[in-house]
Amino acid sequence: MFRWWTKLEVYYQIFIMLFAGAVAGVGLNLLTNNFHVVDPDTSALILSIVKPFGDVFIRMIQMVVIPLVFASLVLGVASLGDPRKLGRIGSKTIAYFLITTGLAVSIGLTFANLVQPGAGFSSELKEQLIESNKDAVSTKQEMKESSKQSFGDIIVNIVPKNPIKDMAEGNMLPVIFFALMIGICLSFIDADKSAHLLKVFDGVNDIMIVIVNIAMKFAPYGVFSLIMVVTCSFGVDVFIALIKYSLVVLIGLTVHAVFTYGLVIKLSGLGFRNYFVGIKDAILVGFSTSSSSATLPVSMKNATENLYVKEDIVSFVLPLGATINMNGTALYQGVAAVFIAQVFGIHLNLEQQLIVVLTATLAAIGAAGVPSAGIVTLLTVLQGIGVPAAGVALIMGVDRLLDMFRTAVNIMGEISAALFVGRTEGQMALPIEEINRRLTEQRTGIKQPIV
């Protein structure tokens, strides 16, 4: 009976279950809150049964993130050999992320100023949203205050005092620094000694990839759970009230993905549709989990196996990208800042909007690759331009939904950076024409002539 299902590719299964979860979640929300067919206790019971499937899936992916990042970074840096090459690749990667993040927030501000999503927002609805999300905003404010650091503190904290503790707590930047140091030092010591250790890291890397493959078999059911819980909790009335704001964010994200990344992908010699086919697993997992970090193992798998970027580039660029590249988050923060200011009747002049560009870019780099981290960094952006932090309550209702889209854009950016660096460094496993041919075959199902 279910033979047809097992024959489907995993990404088709994920897409079907993503749609099914959205329908189930919206349906349950309507039956509970609008039609009152299902009582709230029954709705909560259904969600409590469904939710663990999504949590288990995310935990399976998160379980491999630290060991995979650590092992792959050590291998990648050690294989580069020349520290000057590492410096060149590192500079190129960071510059790419900074430039694209700045472009993203500028696109967001442009659309927000053109459409003015906050204009005409009723004061009654404003008060209602602020009151209903007051506790959530207070929690986010506390998170911001507890993690408040100066620029100097951020730089100092990159160097770990106890790397094992940082691994246990999931602090990515210190882990990346520690892995970089080990990789660099392995390239300096005697090759006979380093070879044994590199084999161990290579084995750890392979084991983590196998675990990712197992987790991906479970992905469709985890995705169904995650999407159903989100859409059921997501009030339809709130979405209707905030539809203009949501559309501005989504249009901005689409423009950034199609034009900014599209240009980079074209310059790299790859067709945009082929690129999207190559990274579809990572996009779907990122969309459903709203976490760049949780999606990292799938992103690395797609970049090496589908786009044929060499592993030493992927293992350096993508872990770094999952930590500091937040293009989608920066764009959303630009739109959100203008939207909240408009609702409160605050006019942002050119100087204040430039502050938004700078603050959103730097804040996005410091954002954790976890769900709704952008809300915490948005508080920093609002503080920089004198907009009331309470305004965050206006967008809390739709934040989780928009978080899914902006995470997908973040992941597109991270993998496009690996492709860009791989092409410019001559670190592709196959000629670009052959990669295009294989991806076209995969996309169309029609055998392509070998070039």
Image: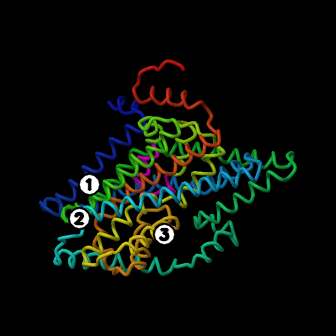
Which is closer to the viewer, label 3 or label 1?
3
Give the SS element for disc 1. helix
Q: Which residues lie in the magenta part? A: 281-295
Instruction: Locate residue 158, reporting x and y percent.
Output: 64, 69
* Quadrant showing the C terminus: top right
Crowding at dot 3, Cα within 10 Å, few <14 / some 14-19 / many 20+, comes out as many
Cβ–Cβ below 8 Å for labels 3 and 2? no
- Closer to the N terminus: mark 2 or mark 1? 1
- Residue named by callout 2: 242
Give the SS element for disc 2. loop
Q: Is residue 239 above or below residue 191?
A: below
User: What residue is shown at x 55% (from left), y 78% (from top)?
Assistant: 149
* Quadrant showing the N terminus: top left
Q: Find the distance from the CA under tag 2 to the CA under tag 1.
A: 19 Å
Give the SS element for disc 3. helix
Disc 2 residue type (three-letter) = Leu
- Residue named by callout 3: 363
- Closer to the N terminus: mark 3 or mark 1? 1
The mark found on residue 25 in the picture is: 1
Rendered image quadrant of residue 135: bottom left
User: What residue is shown at x 26% (from left), y 59% (from top)?
Assistant: 232
Q: Main secondary structure of the magenta part?
A: helix
Cβ–Cβ below 8 Å for labels 2 and 1? no
The answer to which of 205 and 77 lies nearer the viewer is 77
- Residue at the outermost front position: 350
Disc 1 residue type (three-letter) = Gly
